[in-house]
Image (cartoon, rainbow, N blue to C red):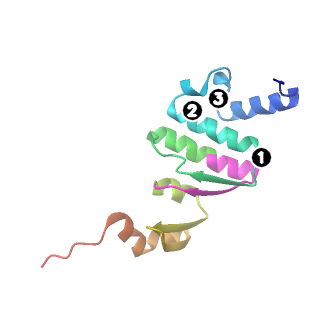
Amino acid sequence: RCAPSPDIRDEAMALLADLRLAGHAQQGARFLSHGDKKRLEFAIALAGRPAILMLDEPTAGMSPSDRADVAALIARMQRERGITVVMTEHDMDVVFGLADRIMVMNYGEVVSTGSVEAVRADPRVREVYLGKEMVHA
């Protein structure tokens, strides 16, 4: 088994510190909280220095505070590293807070696509997420 070079180790530790995981560097992933495991997954993905990062439900199962932390982390990585992020996410507050462009799908069909403002105002999006208005006779 060969040890990583000092440069690689320093880079890994800097990434862990950046994601508030440096204190867990010697701990097995199975002992991390759910939010810390999500941050570790993010660190592993970022270690490859991607130009495009694809995320599937990055805030699923998180508490509101962890959700806000991860959304802020994604926004910071986009800004600081110039990474394009493509993600699926059901939490529309997270989506609206991060996205430049959005595509809303329902059962494989594109419902709406465009800017945050255009998608937010689209009545078809509200219908998909909130249901049709009930008309009383």
Locate the N terminus by quadrant.
top right
Residue 48 among those drawn in magenta: no
**Element under disc 2:** helix
As measured in the structure, the alpha-carbon distance from the residue carrying label 2 to the one carrying label 1 is: 20 Å
Look at 29% across and 72% down and name the residue there.
132
How many other residues sit within 10 Å of disc 3, few (<14), some (14-19) or many (≥20)? some
**Relative to 18, is 53 above or below?**
below
> Taking 36 as reference, is 6 left or right?
right
> Taking 1 as reference, is 35 left or right?
left
Name the image quarter holding residue 20: top right
Name the image quarter holding residue 45: top right
Residue designated by label 2: 36
Q: Assess whether mark 3 and mark 2 are in contact (beta carbons under 8 angstroms).
A: yes
Estimate the x, y position of residue 105 in percent, counting from the top left.
48, 68
Look at 44% across and 68% down and name the residue there.
106
Estimate the x, y position of residue 32 in percent, counting from the top left.
55, 27
Residue 77 among those drawn in magenta: yes
Look at 83% across and 32% down and name the residue there.
8
> Which residues are drawn in magenta?
74-90
> Taking 134 as reference, is 46 left or right?
right
Residue designated by label 3: 21
Residue designated by label 1: 49
Please identify, in this view, whether the residue under mark 3 or under mark 1 is nearer the observer. 1
